[in-house]
Image (spheres, rainbow, N blue to C red):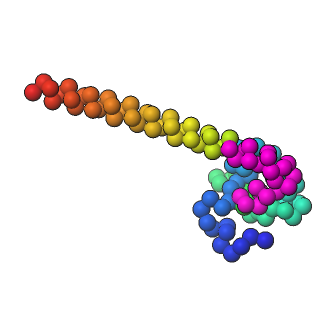
Amino acid sequence: MAEHGQWNRKGETLSDVTAQKEYGVSRDFIVKGIQAGKLEYREGAVWGNPYLRILRSQLEQYIAEELGADCLSNVKNQTELRKIKREMTSLKKKLNKLQARKTEIENGSNRT
């Protein structure tokens, strides 16, 4: 059972679609876990589209039990790597913009 307030904390829950993207599991895998009593869930809907909300900690435990801890750690590492690459790309774009602005200011101040 989930501890009190776990459903309300940021990052503790995720939708079935997000779980599929982050952990590489299918919706059927999630539904099997719910039916087996391993995963608690809540139903939700956004713009009329239904989804399942599940607890991240329970999903990770279920994945470790069913697919192995190695599989879980590999998936988590790949997810973290994607986030790092995305952030690096964003920072490179910001740096390029700042360098262009710096050059523009320096060239503008040299003319006067």
Give the answer, above or below, for where 84 lies relative to 106: below
Q: Is residue 87 magenta?
A: no
Residue at figure coordinates x 26%, y 28% from the top left: 103
Chain part drawn in magenta: 56-77
Give the answer, above or below, for where 74 lies relative to 1: above
Residue at figure coordinates x 78%, y 71% from the top left: 1
Front one among 102 and 36: 102
Q: Position of residue 19 (x, y in %)?
A: 72, 50
Residue at figure coordinates x 68%, y 44% from the top left: 77
Regarding residue 22, the answer to whether it shows in the image is no
Horizontally, is 53 left or right of 81 in the view?
Answer: right
Horizontally, is 77 left or right of 70 in the view?
Answer: left
Q: Position of residue 72 (x, y in %)?
A: 77, 48
Give the quadrant of the C terminus. top left
Regarding residue 5, the answer to whether it shows in the image is yes
Q: Position of residue 98 (x, y in %)?
A: 34, 35
Residue at the farthest right position: 36
Question: How many numbered discs, if any?
Answer: 0
